[in-house]
Amino acid sequence: MTTSDKELYKCWASLKEDRVVGIVSMRAPAHIDFSDYRAKAVSRLESLGGRVKGGKVVERDGQVFFIKRPTHENRNKHPRPVTYYPIKEEWLA
C-alpha cells in the first residue's frame, strides 16, 4: 500500500483466478451478532467459487481495489509486494 492510497473500509472478498468476484463489508450493524454476520458473509462468498480473503478496499488514482491482509507482516524483514485486485464500480453503490 502506498501513501497515495485512501483506505475506504475493511471487507472480505472472494478471489477467483486473481479477480474479485464478490465483496462483503466487515461493518455489521450494532444489533447484529458479529460472529453470525461473519459466518454468513464468508459462506455466501464461498458459494461464488473463489478463495475468501480478508483485507481492505482502497482508492488509488480514482480507481478502487481490494488488497489482501498480509500475514505476519511485521515478522518479515522483506515483505511481499502488495497485489491490487480491481473492483467493479457497480459493486460499490
Image (cartoon, helix red, strand yellow):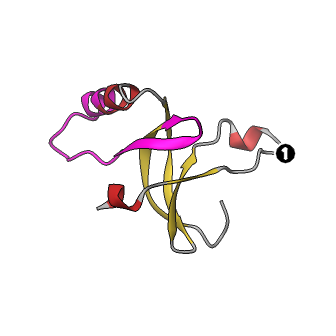
Question: In the image shown, does 77 or 42 lie closer to the viewer?
Answer: 42
As drawn, 91 above or below 4: above
Residue 27, image x, y percentages: 31, 48
Q: Residue furthest right?
A: 77
The x and y percentages for residue 50 are 48, 29
Q: Quadrant of residue 14?
A: top left
**Mark 1 — residue?**
78
- Answer left or right for 19 relative to 27: right
Q: Is residue 8 magenta?
A: no
Label 1 CA crowd tier, 10 Å (few <14, some 14–19, many 20+): few
Q: Secondary structure at mark 1?
A: loop
Quadrant location of the C terminus in the rendered image: bottom left
The residue sitting at 54% across, 43% down in the picture is: 19
Residue in the picture at 84% in, 45% down: 78
Q: Is residue 63 above or below residue 48?
A: below
Picture residue at 33% right of the left edge, 25% below the top = 43
Q: How many marks?
A: 1
For image coordinates 58% across by 68% down, the residue present is 5
Percent x, y for residue 8? 44, 62
Side of 26 where 16 appears, left or right: right
**Which residue type does callout 1 highlight?**
His
Decide: is 40 above or below 11: above
For the magenta stretch, what is the residue range?
15-40
